[in-house]
Image (cartoon, coloured by chain):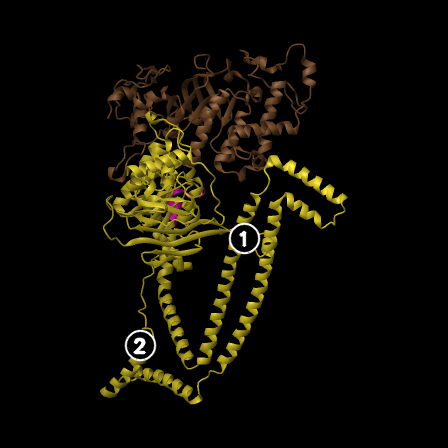
Amino acid sequence: MIGTRPVLSVENLSVEYEVGAGRFQAVSDVSLVIPRGRVVGIVGETGCGKSTLAQAIPRLLPEPPAHIRSGKVIFQGTDLVKVPRSKLPLVRGTGIGMIFQEPLNSLNPAFRVFDQIAESVQMRHWRETGVLPSFHPGPTPFDYSRRPMPETADVLTHPIIPPGAKDEVTRRVSTMTRADYRKEVLDYLRLVRINDPETILNLFPHELSGGMRQRIMIAMALSQKPALLIADEPTSALDVTIQAQVLTLMKELIDEVHASILYISHDLGVVAETADDLGVMYAGRLVEFGPVAEIFESPRHPYTKSLLRSIPTRYKSDWPMPTIPGSVPNLSQLPRGCRFHPRCSLAKPICSREPPPPLRVMAPVTGDETPHKSACHYAEEVANLP
Amino acid sequence: MSATPPAANPSPLLETEALTKYFPIVRSIAEVVGRKPGRAIHAVDGVNLVVNAGETVGLIGESGSGKTTLGWVVARLHDPTDGALRFEGKDVFALEGGELRHWRRNVQVVFQDPVGSLDPRLKVWQVVGEPLRAQNQMERWFARNEPKRVVREYRTKVRKERERLRLEYRPDLKARQFLTTEYEKGVAQRAKARDEARRRLDRDYEVAIARADKMKPAPEDLKRVEAEYRAALERAKKAGMPPKQRQEILYQFRPDLKERNRLTNEYDAELARRTKLRTEEEKRLGKEFKVARKAAKKRKLPPEEKKRRYAEYRTFVKVARKAARKPKLPPEEKMRRYEGYRALAKTLPPPPVIPKIPVPPMISNAQIRRRVAEALPLVGLMPAILDQYPHEFSGGGRQRISLARALIVNPKLIILDEPTSALDVAVQAQILNRLVELQRERGIAYILITHNVAAVRFVADRVAVMYLGQIVELGPVREVLERPVHPYTKALLAALPVADVRRRRTRYRIGGDIPTLVDPKPGCRFAPRCPFAEDQCQLNDPVLQPRPGAPSHQVACLRAEQVAGVSPADLLQEGGGAAATLKAAASGALAAG
């Protein structure tokens, strides 16, 4: 699966928020490549722009206040940044699935599980068959699974219907009955290993446990048959035992449905277990990217190194535990030069003057084919840090 | 306070005894009419926990294990169902009203959700200063009310004593009172016993029904059996069977239904029998009680004896008063009367010392601001943020504000409910460092409630592992985390994510169904999910017992010594899901050990 065209490539993406008088960059100059069938993890502290990045990729950010300043998000050959705002509903949910952190807040409390998953199955069904429901105001949603996205966004304004069959197809009515949807929804619930799906189907989200809700979210995301799944802290709200269940499930699903995953988390333990490649973000920048084994074995950025060291593995008698002094800089008052230099033990005068070079490829330590890159003036010397 | 284990015999700061908290489930009308006993969620079930001054006890377990409920009951935010809680030897559950509020300064809570527990309309100094104001208010209340309370307490004692003396010369009243309380006690006792018996009967019935259901034909045979039954029925109808026989034919084919019917009939008959028995018994006992009361009335003292005793009592009062009023008697006479007074006064409680407590002045906003500004650096915040609002802070900042609010009244115990679960590793490390540092400086005890084992490892001296409302393992943190004994602890540790790519592997997943907390069945609560469970585990309740050779390490497991040698990593071996493999591992370890 690996080696063909990447599912998603993000090139120099910058996202700004305009709040009141000020504007600050939550994501600056981030480049990422997600190959097919691979899990790419993103870690970083709160406020480093992880979630902004996750929502900017499928264009879910409210614009304004958010604004994509520059860069490209190329998904299946199409630049999503160029899609005009009025056409966004056509793009969403057609190839990128999203799993949010708070399953309770992302499920509609007024609808039963069946209705919520069925809606998403229905959307996919309409898209695949070219059926236009009578109440649907716009043109047919675009279907990535059938053909590559055209290069220019203008084409999106036209329904993608086989030539010569336009009238016939658009007037076709969906023949799916409620029973058909029920069958399909049950299949997806079984896919995410829910016991007794017939009962669960008729429950409301508040009647389910946290792990169960998260599985419903995953089932909803999968029912769109996405090529890329963006998971924004999917297990942070769960118990370790439930977390283990959900993670194992996600890993099994990657093999079953051949999706790639962009996995966003602040839990290094979970990422070490799940991801193949790992990106580390700090104050809106991607400071290090590479195969997960390589980053954990020989981090090439002082921030990654100190982050790994502050994982508590000690007893009280070994007090204090190493930590990163200071706190994450406010995005409206970023330090000059390298954004990490006020908290960095390796900082030299050049770090406060000049921004670090863009991600540089380091000499590989393990044999993984993803290059290991770091954005630090002294990337080679990081290994010698205590 | 140092991090070394506390001295050999430290006085416990907090001690719980069989602490229990049930949340009752509202009964439906059908259940009330059917006289079904009420059901309850057993959130905390018989927890014995000791927290010494200046030490940290970590509580770990999955959600729903009762950790938070236990913390809330200990802080008296929930009223307990049963059990005792002593704080510095004082019974906390007996406190009420102002006394309880005055006690609250000893125990503070850092709540799970820093967003929900900080009032968004209050500024930082107001949020953090709130406990100061409350404490000041309660100190003023205490200064004004403590003398009154002491007097009130003394008067109650004297009144009780007088009542006792009065009953001494009215044996009829005494006997009647005794009979009434005994009768009421008996009624309550009988009701409780009946409830118990009913619960046992219900369970036996359910078990018997389940056994009967096993006689049911297999699903694949069901259609065939039904067809045969219909055929037999047709045949019988043609042969002109009486309608009553229909059931008998059905029972030939479905012995399970016959058994069910028999059981249900028996059950109903038993219920009816018990109801009848109960009515009769209550009637009889009520009659007996009335007769006894009447008889007690006649138990008056003979008039002269009554007069004598009463006169004795009055003389004592008179003599005592005179003695107090007129001390200028001849010394021998004074001594004689005084002796008499002493002899009788021994039965009366000694008069109290009425404390004189100066009422502290009301605390001003300026004072609160100053105290808050002093407290903020303790948790690593700048005093300059006094006038900001909680929403302006990140998760870590809010957590620090919550911590400052708990610290400001100098509590002896802080209950930390998931203080770092919403935080990043770097901030988490900072806050955990701070907690340990504060404990060393001020000797505060912590109860750390979390499912983050890493935090418990770093902050706790001892750790208690909870499962479904009970403590299953309790011991020094190193001992429990490195050599866990209880299978649940092992499973929990094996399910942890490890930030180490070399040890990248599938985590252990606990199989089986989580048993319900609604009136749980007897037996070990972990047994249905336990890879080492045997038949005895389903039947007998394990008790928290010290391990031989390690009195500080307590485990509630019937097979503790057999499974002690199995390490959490053994649960992860290939094909580890099969109980057989694990049992083999257990017996292997047993053979090796």
The location of residue A343, given as percent across then percent down, is 29, 28
Indicate left or right for B243 with A289 as reference. right
Which residue was labeled with disc 2?
Answer: B346
Position of B254 with respect to B361 (left or right) is right
Residue drawn 48% across and 73% down?
Answer: B179
**Both labels 2 and 1 in a single chain:** yes
| Residue B166 in which image quadrant | bottom left
Q: Can you say whether B582 is above or below A285 in the image? A: below
Q: Which residue is mark 1?
A: B202
Residue A111 located within the stretch drawn in magenta? no
Q: Give, as a three-letter code, the residue at label 1.
A: Asp
State how many labels appear.
2
Is residue B122 a member of the stretch shown in magenta? yes
Give the residue at x 60% y 48%: B260
Q: Which image quadrant: the C terminus of chain B?
A: top left
Residue B85 x %, y %: 37, 55
